[in-house]
Amino acid sequence: MELSESKKLRNVSSVGSERCFDRAEVTGSSPVRSTVVTKIVLFILLLSVNNLLFAQRNLIVEYGKYFKLTSKITNKEVEGFDYEGSLYVQGDSLTFFTLKPQMPDIKRGTIGRERDHHALYAFPKLQRTISENFWTHPFGLMEYKMDTAKWHLFEDTLTVMGYLCKAAARDAVRVWYAVDIPVASGPFQYFGLPGIVLMVENFKYKRKYQATSIRESKYKIVIPKAKFRACKDCDSKIEEIKKYFPD
């Protein structure tokens, strides 16, 4: 992921400098060229600061499943999105995805304490996830290695909820991730990209999911009181995960 971001920055700076130099028709270390280079450096620094600030933000992203049907009343086609889950983002190191709406603990200012079999916690920096299992034995908080199978990145762009997104694909799935929200997470188990996933197109099952709301979150992510169960096919990082939930 870091290599992809670095490549993008080099492309931005080189394209910008070539255009300015051609227009000014200068060579060597002239004042005009120095000014252009300075502007490029400032632009890159501003972009980096912007990404850092975004990475520290807490967000709530709601997703919907696309539908299209014919109304029995008007006999016209109707399309829209049914609620399909919420992703709580805590900086760039922790996300919490749930398929069912959860009521936050207003008094404590937290979300996630409620037991939810479909809930999924992701720790991009640790490359681990925690899945809640309260339906079958053994009950508990199950640790897994994060699914970061190789993505193929493309330069195609699309605006989703006002955010510029780029495309990535693997298998029969194409996703669109926001380049301005550098969080390597998304709904379900779509991880490992340079930005948060705002749209998922599953061509195998002919389904589309899309962010329908993005807003600031004032809630701290917590986890239910239950036993952690270590990963069976990877090196466990449960002790590091517990540090995210000191309470």
Image: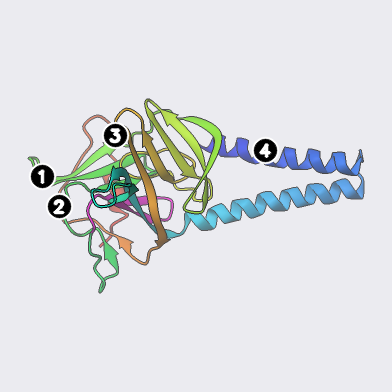
Quarter the C terminus occupies: bottom left
Q: Which mark is residue 235?
A: 3
In the image, is 209 to the left or to the right of 1? left
Mark 3 touching mark 2, by CB under 8 A?
Answer: no
Q: Say which residue label 2 marks.
A: 226
Q: Are marks 4 and 3 in contact (CB under 8 Å)?
A: no
Given contact means CB atoms under 8 Å apart, are the residues at marks 1 and 2 in contact? yes
Name the mark nearer the viewer: 3 or 2. 2
**Among the 4 quarters of the image, the one containing residue 207:** top left
Q: Amino acid at mark 2?
A: Ala
* Residue 106 drawn above or below residue 225: below
Q: Amino acid at mark 1?
A: Phe
How far apart are the two marked residues, 4 and 3, measured between alpha carbons? 35 Å
Amino acid at dot 4: Arg
* Mark drawn on residue 139: 1
| Mark 1 to mark 4 CA distance (whole Å) | 48 Å
Viewer-nearest of discs 1 and 3: 1
Q: CA distance from mark 1 to mark 3?
A: 21 Å
Nearest to N terminus: mark 1 or mark 4? 4
| Residue 4 as seen in the image, left or right of residue 114 | right
Measured from the top left, where is residue 20 in percent x and y? 82, 44
